[in-house]
């Protein structure tokens, strides 16, 4: 049951991510600033879009690969779906931040850094939850003789 719920949320997060990617692509200028230092690090709009699409597609295809490799372990597959959901949330927030940065508006970017770090923290927390869960499962099951 948990795997089905995670699959539904993963699919929804993937649809939202691809819709967000298209929305961000439409709002980007011809040269996309990626890094703010003395000399802006920039890339063209189309290469940025295609690179982001490839990365997003590759990460989301990993769900199918893991589902094929770990057919029997539904707990691990459910956890992996949750991990990809947290990665998709990070990608959505990152793409929106890049679009905001390139919009040309004056904005205090320091006021929203907790959102980016929070999504990254969600990913790290979810990634660390599997080892904790597997250790709990290993030591909580008592073998009867």
Image (cartoon, rainbow, N blue to C red):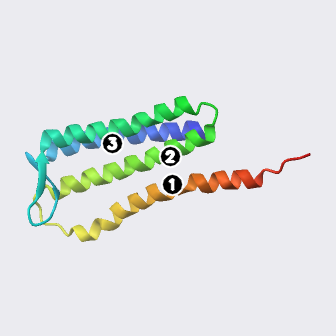
Taking the image as drawn, is residue 1 in sight? Answer: no
Q: Nearer the viewer, residue 87 or 2?
A: 87
Give how far apart the Cα atoms at labels 3 and 2 are. 15 Å
Measure the C-alpha gap from mark 3 to mark 1: 19 Å
x then y, percent, for residue 132? 62, 57
Q: Are marks 2 and 1 in contact (CB under 8 Å)?
A: yes
Classify 10 Å Cα crowding around label 2: few (below 14), some (14-19), many (20 and above): many
What is the count of numbered marks?
Answer: 3
Is the residue 6 above or below the residue 109 in the image?
A: above
Residue at image location 29% in from the left, 66% down from the top: 112
Q: CA distance from mark 2 to mark 1?
A: 7 Å
- x%, y% of residue 145? 92, 45
Sequence-first tag of 3 and 2: 3
Residue indicated by mark 3: 17
Question: How far from the left and from the top, in percent, is residue 106?
Answer: 12, 66
Residue 102 seen from this side? yes
The tag on residue 12 is: none
Q: Which mark is residue 126?
A: 1
Q: Which marked residue is nearer to the observer: mark 3 or mark 2?
A: 2
Q: Earlier in the sequence, mark 2 or mark 1?
A: 2
Find out whether the residues at labels 3 and 1 contact each other: C-beta distance under 8 Å. Answer: no
Check disc 1 and report its element: helix, strand or loop. Answer: helix
Give the quarter of the figure containing the N terminus: top right
In front of the other: label 3 or label 1?
1
- Residue 82: mark: 2
Q: Of marks 3 and 1, which one's residue comes earlier in the chain?
A: 3
Q: Secondary structure at mark 2?
A: helix
Q: Residues within 10 Å of mark 1 (few under 14, many from 20)?
A: some
Q: Secondary structure at mark 3?
A: helix
Residue visible at 47% across and 36% down? 63
């Amino acid at each position: 049951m948990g795997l089905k719920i995670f699959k539904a949320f993963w699919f929804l997060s993937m649809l939202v991510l691809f819709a967000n990617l298209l929305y961000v692509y439409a709002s980007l200028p011809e040269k996309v600033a990626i890094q703010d230092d003395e000399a802006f690090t920039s890339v063209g709009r189309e290469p940025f879009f295609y690179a982001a699409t490839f990365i997003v597609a590759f990460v989301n295809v990993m769900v199918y690969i893991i589902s094929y490799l770990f057919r029997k372990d539904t707990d691990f597959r459910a956890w992996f779906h949750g991990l990809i959901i947290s990665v998709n949330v990070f990608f959505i927030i990152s793409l929106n931040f890049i679009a905001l940065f390139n919009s040309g508006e004056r904005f205090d970017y320091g006021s929203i850094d907790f959102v980016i770090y929070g999504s990254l923290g969600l990913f790290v927390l979810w990634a660390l939850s599997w080892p904790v869960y597997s250790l709990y499962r290993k030591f909580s099951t008592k073998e009867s003789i």
